[in-house]
Amino acid sequence: QVQLVESGGRSVQAGGSLRLSCAASGRTISIYRMGWFRQAPGNEREFVAAINWSGGSTDYADSVKGRFTISRDNAKNTVSLQMNSLKPEDTAVYYCAVAIGTSIGGPLGQGTQVTVSS
């Protein structure tokens, strides 16, 4: 079974940028559609972005479209999320996982906390 470890989250001011990384071990993720999801306190977990196995197709939540970019490196078994123009409402714990459409399709990692202050 694949194990996922997210990293890169920290506190940042509004308008700033962060790059999150997700490292997979245990098995290759190169054949899977992968996604990023997030959960803010008191809210349900929500879809952020997804990328198909080759990296040739991506999908984004409307709330992050134009600001976030998902990418992958199958040789390194990693998925990344570049987040620009961050807003306080982006504050959440971010998780990567196998994605089925815009839903979580596999186990999550421990997540990485992103806090955006105004």
Image (cartoon, rainbow, N blue to C red):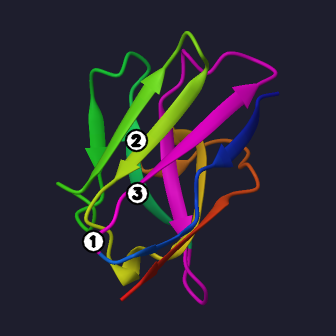
Q: Residue at x 57, y 27 (%)?
A: 78
Residue 10 in view: yes
Q: Quadrant of the C terminus?
A: bottom left
Name the residue carrying label 1: 15
Q: Residue at x 61, y 54 (%)?
A: 95
Q: Residue at x 64, y 48 (%)?
A: 7
Q: Residue at x 36, y 59 (%)?
A: 17
Name the residue carrying label 2: 50
Amino acid at pointer 3: Val
Left or right: residue 61 compared with residue 4? left
Quadrant of res 18: bottom left
Q: Is label 1 in contact with label 3 (beta carbons under 8 Å)?
A: no
Q: Quadrant of the N terminus?
A: top right
Name the residue carrying label 3: 48
Q: Position of residue 94 (x, y in %)?
A: 57, 60
N-terminal-most mark, 1 or 3:
1
The magenta-colored residue range is: 15-44
Vertical comparison of 19 with 30: above or below:
below
Left or right: residue 118 compared with residue 25? left
**Residue 2 in magenta stretch:** no
Q: Which mark is residue 93?
A: none
Say few, some or many: other residues with alpha carbon within 10 Å of mark 2 (under 14 / 14 to 19 / 20 or more).
Answer: many
Residue 101 in view: no
Say few, some or many: other residues with alpha carbon within 10 Å of mark 1 (under 14 / 14 to 19 / 20 or more).
Answer: some
Vertical comparison of 64 with 109: above or below:
below
Q: Residue 20 versus residue 63: which sits nearer the camera?
A: 20
